[in-house]
Amino acid sequence: MLLPIQNENGFDLHSIAANLEGLEETIIFILINRAQFAENRVVYQPHASGFEGAGEESLFEIRLRRHEEMDAEFGRFCVPEERPFMKGLPAAKRKVALPPTGLHIEDFDVVNVTEGILDAYLSLVGEICTKVDDGQYGSSVEHDVAALQAIARRVHFGALYVAESKFQLNPETYARLARAGDRQGLLRELTRAEVEERILGRIALKVEHIQSQINPLVRKSIPADAIMNFYKSSIIPLTKEGEIRYLLNRAL
Amino acid sequence: MLLPIQNENGFDLHSIAANLEGLEETIIFILINRAQFAENRVVYQPHASGFEGAGEESLFEIRLRRHEEMDAEFGRFCVPEERPFMKGLPAAKRKVALPPTGLHIEDFDVVNVTEGILDAYLSLVGEICTKVDDGQYGSSVEHDVAALQAIARRVHFGALYVAESKFQLNPETYARLARAGDRQGLLRELTRAEVEERILGRIALKVEHIQSQINPLVRKSIPADAIMNFYKSSIIPLTKEGEIRYLLNRAL
């Protein structure tokens, strides 16, 4: 995060949007790096991890769980926008000193939409990676974890701070809709079609530009429209789902 | 790795070089992602991790060790070019099925130059990151580990396969120099100044191109000459040091 998102008047929606924009390259870079390895479907299959003492869990699931257990001890999930994919993680072993978040919910995990992120990401892998098996299972799942975490950070950062910031701009309307439990009304109120269009266009241009001078003999590139569609059908809707959950649970 | 590096005649130096070229973007992407966080010097300081039960180790060292312990169980270090930074790691908990490596040394760790990589990388962090403290310690050390592993993979892949491939092209000369323990002679024989110049020029262009359309308000960019110098003064010389070690230990 390059920009402070709060000032004396509360949250600044432009700075929040700017931080979300800055996370786009991080996500794109990691997805391109993942695509340098084959899809390696077997790493997602249950009972096939080849990991000592493992049962049903796939190699991917074992890696994600082990990684999040480590991250939990480092205090990652004390940060509002860092929501875990796994349950039952250990407590933090270090104090994470955070400035006041400015958020108004008790439990950040009410906005946790990792289940939807995971489903969408696993479909995306099939679109950006070569559909073969190159045997590089360890590298594949390692990059999966990095990609999922970057995507989840973007989605939950948006869910929490965009929602709070919009609430502050229009507290009466949002409080009324939230009290009535009106999900459709909240979704309508939150949605800015022209902002979404701008994001999608920018994503496609970035994916194309970053790869425009790649040597295709040594580097696999990923299709811009796959990433744009991933934003359109998953990242943006899941962010809005998180925003709705935030607003439905916000202190009124 | 996109290209097979062996054929019926042994190693193909062009394919090895092509794979090294393909790793350049991976390294550049990860370094750019690291630079989105401040230098956060405290994470490298001993006795300052804030980690429960930790002693002298810095937060960075704890993270690197914990990450490599996990990786070791996943079998990462069974792969020739994956050399660990830490000692005393646990055994693999899964079988890593590798095709014959075609290498002719008993212990891949004779080429391990991670100590040099670590020193060089820690200097580089000070050049590419803003020299402040943004409190994002967990993210900083997480990106450090990813960057170090990408750099180490590039260096050791080159050290092992470039050396073996050059040996195969000129076995008498290399065997004579290796038997005589002639490090200077090996270094002279290995060095291709024009290839190094080409790599350096390409690195600078890539760093510039990838960042040329970045929005500086939302994204920190890293200087192309810092990355070019890192290749010049660290990645290339450390790869050659690894090549020399390989040749001095190769079965003759």
Image (tube, coloured by chain):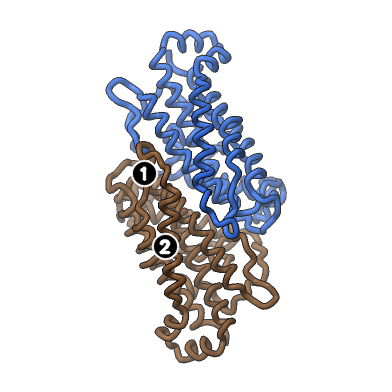
Chain colours: A brown, B blue
Q: Residues within 10 Å of mark 1 (few under 14, many from 20)?
A: many
On screen, residue A160 versus residue A216, left or right, reads: right
| Res. A58 image quadrant | bottom left
SS of the residue under disc 1: loop
Residue B209 seen by the camera: yes
Position of A218 relative to B140 (above/below): above
Q: Which residue is labeled 2 in the image?
A: A201
Instruction: Please tell me which residue is depicted at 53% across the width and 24% down the height of the picture.
Output: B240
Q: Which mark is residue A220?
A: 1
**Which amino acid is tagged 1?**
Lys
Residue A52 seen by the camera: no
Q: Residues within 10 Å of mark 2 (few under 14, many from 20)?
A: few
SS of the residue under disc 2: helix
Instruction: Please tell me which residue is depicted at 41% across the width and 64% down the height of the picture.
Output: A200
The subunit letter for the residue under badge 1 reads A
**Which amino acid is tagged 2?**
Gly
